[in-house]
């Protein structure tokens, strides 16, 4: 029999009276804390530490290199014994928190990282405590994602029938868009037979020479090959040259290739340049090509009346990828994908399985689910 200890009335970190009249075991097979009052006190300390960190972050360096003794702490053998929470907390404060990339600091100006915001930290805490698997099922967290999709359709001028999906970032969103465009070009049988079916089609894609590297990687992952991405020269404003784009498409058709995709960039990483999205949309409509926009950096400029006109044509895209964790300043990861034809999107990923069977009521209701629109089944 386990020994027990009586828990007296306690005052918590914020002075609230807590009455604990029941006896709790000293040792338990449960993953719950063995002593909730102590756990709550330490949890409040951790929260206060992080709020204090954010409140006073301007007094800290933006970035600093980690000393060798700190790096050495993360090159040790697998521990067998447990470590108490207070020790882990101290390890975090002393040897992890001071040595991040520094993007949460208002003085961080590198690359295109987002900084986050204190309210986002609290949202992450709520989400982590709920610990829902948002891959599907009849639950309100999935409805939250659907609401965001409807809002983004409204913001970007997409139809109500469009689909949306949260992913880790725009690299993954771009990859999913390439898969949907590939299936639209070759038919959904390609999911089973692969891209090398007879007669093979040599698909070709087009993007600015300054496009993000993940576009070439997406073609690689999709089985098309990164060499099939045609880098198009840029004009004096660092935008994709539309005349050169039209010429490249025409040349590939003459040589027996099958152009299928043009990627416009709304905010290049190097200069923030925005391609002529309306002009690209015209060309894609004329040539029967899938028009995708990589808006990781700049798509959310739609929220700013003075910048939104620069994105004219984004509403004509077949798919759009962007990040809430950049200009949206929410915590990582929060990439998002919109696809104009929601049914094409679903057919590119939906896969039947007994454990994913759908019903008209109960927890198995509410189809389609987010897992029908991307590769992740388990997702936050």
Image (cartoon, grey):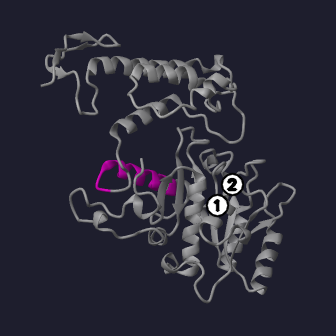
Badge 1, how many Cα within 10 Å: few under 14, some, many 20+?
A: many
Residue 72 visible in the shown view:
yes
| Quarter of the rendering containing residue 246 | bottom right
**Residue at 66% of width from left, 61% of height from top?**
217
Label at residue 293: 1
Residue closest to the far bottom: 199
The numbered mark, 2 or 1, whose residue comes first in the sequence reads: 2
Residue closest to the far left: 1
**Residue at 48% of width from left, 71% of height from top?**
348
User: SS for tag 1?
Assistant: strand
Q: Which x, y percent locates residue 179?
A: 56, 68
In contact (CB < 8 Å): disc 2 and disc 1: yes
154 left or right, relative to 283:
left
- Viewer-proximal residue, 203 or 8? 8
The residues bearing labels 2 and 1 have C-alpha atoms spaced at a distance of 7 Å
User: Within the magenta stretch, is there residue 348?
Assistant: no
| Quarter of the rendering containing residue 63 | top right
Does the magenta stretch mainly form a helix, a strand or a loop?
A: helix
Task: Please tell me whether residue 162 is drawn above or below residue 23 in the rendered image.
Answer: below
**Residue at 53% of width from left, 21% of height from top?**
93
User: SS for tag 2?
Assistant: loop
Q: Which x, y percent locates residue 304?
A: 63, 44
- Viewer-proximal residue, 342 or 177? 177
Label at residue 75: none
| Quarter of the rendering containing residue 98 | top right
Q: Quickly name the residue at label 2.
A: 266
Which residues lie in the magenta part?
137-153
199 left or right, relative to 109:
left
Task: Please tell me whether residue 200 is drawn above or below residue 35 in the rendered image.
Answer: below
Q: Which x, y percent locates residue 122?
A: 44, 31
282 left or right, relative to 328:
right
């Amino acid at each position: 029999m386990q020994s027990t200890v009586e828990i007296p009335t306690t005052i918590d970190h914020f002075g609230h009276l807590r009455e604990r009249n029941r006896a709790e075991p000293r040792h338990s097979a449960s993953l719950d804390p063995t002593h909730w009052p102590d756990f709550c006190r330490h949890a409040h300390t951790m929260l206060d530490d992080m709020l204090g960190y954010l409140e006073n972050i301007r007094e800290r360096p933006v970035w600093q290199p980690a000393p060798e003794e700190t790096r050495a702490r993360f090159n040790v053998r697998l521990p067998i014994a447990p470590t108490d929470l207070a020790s882990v907390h101290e390890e975090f404060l002393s040897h992890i928190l001071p040595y991040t990339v520094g993007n949460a600091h208002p003085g961080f100006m590198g690359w295109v990282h987002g900084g986050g915001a204190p309210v986002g930290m609290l949202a992450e805490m709520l989400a982590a405590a709920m610990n829902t698997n948002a891959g599907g099922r009849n639950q309100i967290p999935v409805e939250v994602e659907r609401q965001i999709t409807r809002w983004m359709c409204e913001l970007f001028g997409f139809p109500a029938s469009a689909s949306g999906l949260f992913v880790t970032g725009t690299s993954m969103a771009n990859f999913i868009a390439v898969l949907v465009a590939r299936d639209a070009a070759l038919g959904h049988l390609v999911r089973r037979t692969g891209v090398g079916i007879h007669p093979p089609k040599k698909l070709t894609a087009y993007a600015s020479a300054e496009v993000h590297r993940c576009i070439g990687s997406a073609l690689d992952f999709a089985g098309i090959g990164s060499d099939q991405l045609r880098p198009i020269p840029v004009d004096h404003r660092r935008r994709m040259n539309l005349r050169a784009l039209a010429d490249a498409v025409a040349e590939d058709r003459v040589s027996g290739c099958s152009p299928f995709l043009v990627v416009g960039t709304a905010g290049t990483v190097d200069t923030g340049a925005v391609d002529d999205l309306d002009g690209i949309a015209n060309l894609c409509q004329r040539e029967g090509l899938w028009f995708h926009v990589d808006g990781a950096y700049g798509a959310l400029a739609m929220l700013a009346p003075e910048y939104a006109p620069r994105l004219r044509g984004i509403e004509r895209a077949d798919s759009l990828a962007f990040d809430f964790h950049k200009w949206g300043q929410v915590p990582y990861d929060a990439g998002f994908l919109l696809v104009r034809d929601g049914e094409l999107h679903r057919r590119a990923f939906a896969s039947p399985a007994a454990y994913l069977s759908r019903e008209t009521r109960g927890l198995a209701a509410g189809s389609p689910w987010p897992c029908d629109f991307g590769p992740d089944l388990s997702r936050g």
